[in-house]
Amino acid sequence: MLSTITSGAVYGVRSHLIQVEVDISQGLPCFQIVGLPGSEVREARERVKVALKNVGVKLPPMCINVNLSPADLPKKGTMFDLPVAVGIMIALGKLKQESVAGTLLLGELGLSGELKPVRGVLPIARESALRGIGRCIVPAENAWEGALVGEMESIGARSVREAVALLSGEDAAVPDADGDKDGSGTGDKSAVKGDSGGNEGGSCHGLSIAAAAVPTEENVREEQLDFAQINGQQGLKRAAEVAAAGFHNLLIIGAPGSGKTMLARRIPSILPPLTREESLEVSAIYSISGLLQFTGSLRTTRPFLNPHHTITGQALAGGGRIPMPGIISLAHRGVLFLDELPEFKRETLDILRQPLEDKRVQIARSSGSYVYPADFMLVGAMNPCPCGFYPDRERCRCTPFEVRRYLNRVSGPILDRMDICVEAMPMAFADMTSNRREESSAQVRKRVMAARKRQEQRFAGTGLHFNADMGAGDVERYCALGEAELRYMERMFTALRLSARSYHRILKVARTIADLDGREGIGETHLAEAICYRQSDHKYWS
């Protein structure tokens, strides 16, 4: 008898529905899986056989063939265990084919028949909903992920016995070893119904969807970081505000202890919150990476990634034998902070050149080509020389050659992609001991949100989110200059020997400054401030 089960798989960040076809026929006893299965999928034969045996299902000495369609897509992971087991149950006549109609099945089986969590449930559930599938049965730990998708009924099961019982609608559909019905172990049949706005109050095995909005310990710790904790450094704060408002790349140069890292860690506190669509997009990446199950909630805050300078290129960009998103993809829609920038290997930093322009990472492997999103805000912090005190010759003992060699660890193309370059001046004693009340992150965030609102209205229906997303054509359209401003930029272009990329980035930063100022047009003052944010690289690299 032939059975067909709907499952799914993730390739990069794209999801595909996979039809698991199971046929049991007379012949030499065998159990084979075809359809470009990976090693994890081939091993499903042993897991499924033992799991079914331990829940009371004896496989007959017949030929069991499993096909994963479409057969030209490589299949990896352990999420096909449950659909294969259910397909065998249908082929044996213990379940009806109609019971799995319009149902997505995902899950890894333990040898006892328990269901274990898998990666990528959220993006697969989203794709299934678009294809008209309204129900999914997944491991209990993943049920809340499916419930986040609109119009998707997500049901969690703790074992294959519970999954079969839920499909059959009976208390227990799997007979025990003696052939009798065993009602023990039947799962909680309560389901979670997702909607576009999130459905609070629904439950799946005691997990409320309201838990998706509960801040994690990491988020609470991030919320305790506030701009009000930084004394002085008004110029640095202003640069961070402009960067946050337009999602511009930011480079901070200064001596040790001047507050570079302290400020960078507080940038997420002034960034606009994730929209629901962005939240689902970011959460899908974390689900594919297997990191979402550790948070137990939808990502509601923008990611902040701070990798160590010993990170490898593969860890940064992604890849591996089984391709997975790298750090720059995990920072999608958030901040990638590279502290001590020159300490990173130059070839590692140069990996960022293409993602900073294309907003995505493409990885080619023998098994296929994988594309991961990488639209992040790059924030770098660095010292101006090995000892950190250049150009203060009273403290700096580095030779000009040592300074030059240190600065050249960061390539020119990377520096050219930094929209804002600002110097962190050494703290004065008066600033350290001042009783002045500093602006809080909430106050700065209000101005950032106002600028963000103007960008939303300007880019409505264009697919752009921030001013930093504009291409050359968009700059001409949205950053038009008057006659006086054009003459000013002509002089600056010649005097500073700007590249075409630098010119466009100055206009994009000026557009953001004008948005913060509440102005529709870009004035000379906005252009002058934007140009000042590029003079620091001339100071050190000239």
Image: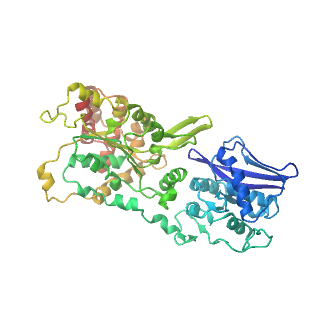
Image point 87% across, 49% down: which residue?
A: 27
Please state the total of marks drawn on the protein image. Answer: 0
Query: Height in image: 518 above or below 309?
Result: below
Horizontally, is 512 left or right of 120 in the view?
Answer: left
Q: Can see residue 66?
A: yes
Quarter of image, res 94: bottom right
Q: Nearer the viewer, residue 60 or 151?
A: 60
Image point 33% across, 36% down: which residue?
A: 343
Query: Height in image: 384 above or below 279?
Result: above
Image point 49% across, 64% down: which residue?
A: 212
Query: Height in image: 162 above or below 426?
Result: below
Where does residue 488 sit, x and y in percent of width and height? Answer: 25, 32
Query: Height in image: 495 above or below 326?
Result: above
Quadrant in which the N terminus is drawn = bottom right
Residue furthest out toward the right? 26
Horizontally, is 19 left or right of 494 in the view?
Answer: right
Quarter of image, res 150: bottom right
Where does residue 299 sit, x and y in percent of width and height? Answer: 46, 57
Image point 69% across, 68% down: which residue?
A: 166
Quarter of image, res 531: top left
Q: Nearer the viewer, residue 266 or 156?
A: 156
